[in-house]
Image: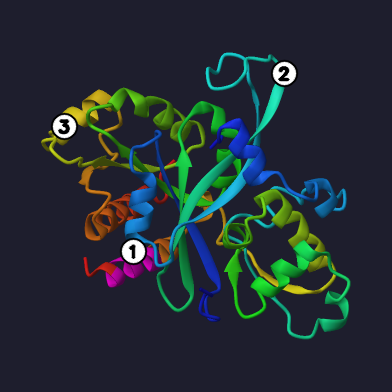
Amino acid sequence: MYLDPTVSRSVKILVVGHFGVGKTTCIGSISEIEPLQTEEEITEASEGFDDLSGTPEKTTTTVAMDFGRLTLSDTLVLYLFGTPGQERFKEMWEGLARGALGALVVVDPERLHESFPVLDLVEQFGLTCAIGVNRFDGTPDYPLDEVREALNVSEQTPVVHCDVRDQDSSAQALITLVQHLMTRLGQP
Amino acid sequence: MREDPDGELELTSALVPLFVIAKGRALPAENEYEHTTLVTARDDTSAAARTLSPEARTVMDLIADGFLSVAEVSGYTRLPLGIVRILLAQMAEDGLIFVRNPAPRAEQVDRELLNAVLDGLKTRFGA
């Protein structure tokens, strides 16, 4: 449960994506602890959202967020935060994006359009990202070039297949992200 | 996520309002007691700890034996993150806890840190 007493540095990576895309599964497949949840309060204008009563005032909503932990060495621990990608959760991103190394964006190849708000937030918060194209049962592997084109992400951004249920596959996607972060060092 | 209204009342309405737990204190600065800030209780605090609120006592007990992140404190105690941050700020002011701040913000991340992350991942997963 506790960190090794020698652990003196913590870093975080965000695992982002739309509802139901597999963020929590991804975190669960690589976390050394059972994924936990934090409850955070956000305020939002409730008008225009179909899941709220429609009163025009701002309301306070509690959002539960899953996260996991991975001790990387005697001195270093990595936290993975599953961050919902809807624009109305932007307030939560403020705290989470601060200090994050980068973001792994999990996408569903059959619902790519649902990832646009997520990618927009990644851009707004200036996060460097890699795209993990989740593999769902019974669906073929989509050509990564087509996914890249549909998502309209830059040539430099890595796009990889990622079976979020599989530890090695999820880990490989994270490794791809960190390698990409290293190539970005020193670049604007 | 929102529960259905009945479930929400039953499951999450606190017996003690949150502002009472927080004793009316405001949130600490945004860059303090972040999700990944690590905290642990100091050993020599029994006298001061006696006057803690039940919630602060719960937090102290949880972190008595080692370091946990602020997010984990919130997760294990099921206290909202904001409340945990307020409690920890007060406990730090009272000299009850040790605090280790997270690695610096992304723009200042250096090659050495990323290398350590990459090596750690590769070691853990044999990639």
Quarter of the picture containing the C terminus of chain B is: bottom left
**Badge number at residue A57:** 2
As helix, strand or loop, the secondary structure at mark 2 comes to: loop
| Circles 2, 3 touching at the beta carbon (< 8 Å) | no
Q: In which quarter of the image is residue A80?
A: bottom left
Q: Are marks 1 and 2 on the same chain?
A: no
Q: Can residue A97 be seen in this view?
A: no
Q: Earlier in the sequence, mark 2 or mark 3?
A: 2
x and y percentages locating residue A104 in the rendered image: 36, 45
Q: Is residue A1 visible?
A: yes
Query: In this view of the protein, which residue sits in the foreground, A108 or B77?
Result: B77
Q: Tell me: A181 left or right of A69.
A: left
At x 53% / y 17%, what residue is drawn? Answer: A50
Amino acid under disc 2:
Glu
Q: Distance from label 2 to label 3 (Cα)?
A: 44 Å
**Badge number at residue A75:** none
Chain ID, mark 3: A
Please give the range of residues in magenta: B115-124
Q: Are marks 3 and 1 on the same chain?
A: no
Chain ID, mark 1: B
Amino acid under disc 3:
Asp
As helix, strand or loop, the secondary structure at mark 3 comes to: helix
Q: Mark 1 points at which residue?
A: B118
How many numbered marks are there? Answer: 3
Q: How crowded is mark 2: few (under 14 residues within 10 Å), some or many (20 or more)?
A: few
As helix, strand or loop, the secondary structure at mark 1 comes to: helix
Chain ID, mark 2: A
Q: Name the residue under label 3.
A: A145
Q: Distance from label 1 to label 2 (Cα)?
A: 46 Å
Q: Tell me: A118 left or right of B81.
A: left
Query: In this view of the protein, which residue sits in the foreground, A184 or A77?
Result: A77
Q: Do labels 2 and 3 share a chain?
A: yes
